[in-house]
Structure formats: structure tokens, C-alpha cells
Amino acid sequence: MDAVAQLSEARVLIAPELDGGREVEAAAILASLWLCSALTRARAGDQGAWSDWDQAAGIVSRLPEGYVHPHHPTSRPLVDLYACMLAVELGDPADARRRAHHLDPESIPSTAWRASHLISLARGADAEGSQEGTLAMLQRAAAVSPEVVEFNPAGRELARRLLVDAGATIRADAEALARRVGVTAD
């Protein structure tokens, strides 16, 4: 996992900034690097991703209340969003749903991240075999940002599969979603 090693090297470079007058910004960047590492590890099926997430959560808990980094949406809601994504990536949609239950999507400081979160929840619903839940989450994601659904590989694939496989009760809604995000059956 070269990416994880490179993220570790980047954290070493950022750490001295924690005492260099830019403590808050450096801490936010450091937390962001831990979150990237956690997601990379989770996508490889590595349960150790949670230890990287814990590192990020610990750093973010020490940031000023309501802080959001201006270039990286590092914040408490982002850490919570990553927890949902990790649970989905690690094959635990029930944990993702439990964690998402406490995360208000409106608290996520970026529409792109908010839509990505809803796509992640759609993936969880899909893993549980719920076409209705998948469709509902994708519709919400498209309401936030149809472009994110259109250009997110998982979002596109879920919308395409719904278009092809949706049952009669949701077929019209699946077709409308597919048109909205530019997805075709082929």
C-alpha cells in the first residue's frame, strides 16, 4: 500500500507545523491525511483503517468548535462522514446506517461531500438488497448535486443498475433519476 506509506510521510512533514504558529491549520491538514489513510486502508479491506480514523477524530476534537478548514472540509461532520464511508467500504452497512443516523447531512460543509455521503449510504442500502433505499439515497444525492452522482463511479453504477433492474414499483423513479444524472442502460 504505497499510498498509505506516502500519507504517512506527509504526516511527518506536517507534524512540525503543529508548533510553528499555524497549529490549527496544521492540525486540520494532519487530520485530513489520517482520514485519507483510513479510507485507503478500508478500500483495501484493512480493519486497521479504524485506528487511522481514531487518530483523525482525536485531532479534530481539539480543533475550535465549528472549525472548517478553508481548503479541506476538515471538521467534525467530515470525520463522522468518513466513519460512515469506512463502514460501507469494510462491508458493514448496518454500522454505516447506525453512524449515519447521528449525522445530519446539512451539517456537512460541502455539497460535494454531502452528495458523496448520500451515495455511500446508497451503497449500504444496495449491499442490503434494498432497491428502494438505494433509490431514495441516490435521489437525495442528486437533489444536492446531480453532478456528483453523474461523475462518481459508484453513484453512476448504482443508478445504471437501478435503471436496468428496478422493480415495477420504482421503475419510473429510477428512469427519472437516470435521466437527471445522464446514465443510460448500456
Image (cartoon, rainbow, N blue to C red):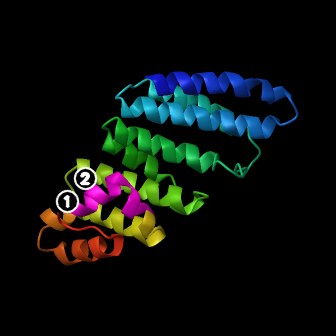
Q: CA distance from mark 2 to mark 1?
A: 10 Å
On screen, residue 53 versus residue 154, left or right, reads right
Residue under the point 58% across and 23% down: 8
Residue under the point 39% across and 25% down: 47
Residue under the point 70% across and 48% down: 69
Pointers 2 and 1 in contact (CB under 8 A)? yes
If the image is split into quadrants, where does the N terminus sit? top left
In primary-sequence order, the first of circles 2 and 1 is 2
Residue 155 is one of the magenta-drawn residues = yes
Residue 125 position in % (x across, y down): 28, 53
* Residues shaded magenta: 148-161
On screen, residue 174 versus residue 19, left or right, reads left
Mark 2 lies on a secondary structure that is helix
Magenta residues, dominant SS class: helix
Front residue of 74/3: it is: 3
Residue 67 position in % (x across, y down): 73, 50
- Give above or below for 22 relative to 172: above
Residue 178 position in % (x across, y down): 27, 71
Question: In which quarter of the view is residue 179 placed?
Answer: bottom left
Mark 1 lies on a secondary structure that is helix
Residue 37 is labelled as none
User: Callout 1, which amino acid?
Assistant: Arg
Q: Which residue is mark 1?
A: 161
Residue 113 position in % (x across, y down): 52, 55
- Give above or below for 185 relative to 172: above
**Residue depth check, mark 2 versus mark 1: number of the one nearer the observer:** 1
Front residue of 86/43: it is: 43
State whether residue 97 appears in this view. yes
Q: Which residue is mark 2?
A: 126
Counting other residues with Cα less than 10 Å from the Cα at mark 2, is it few (<14), some (14-19), or many (20 or more)? some
Front residue of 158/51: it is: 158
Residue that extends furthest to the right in the rendered view of this protein: 21
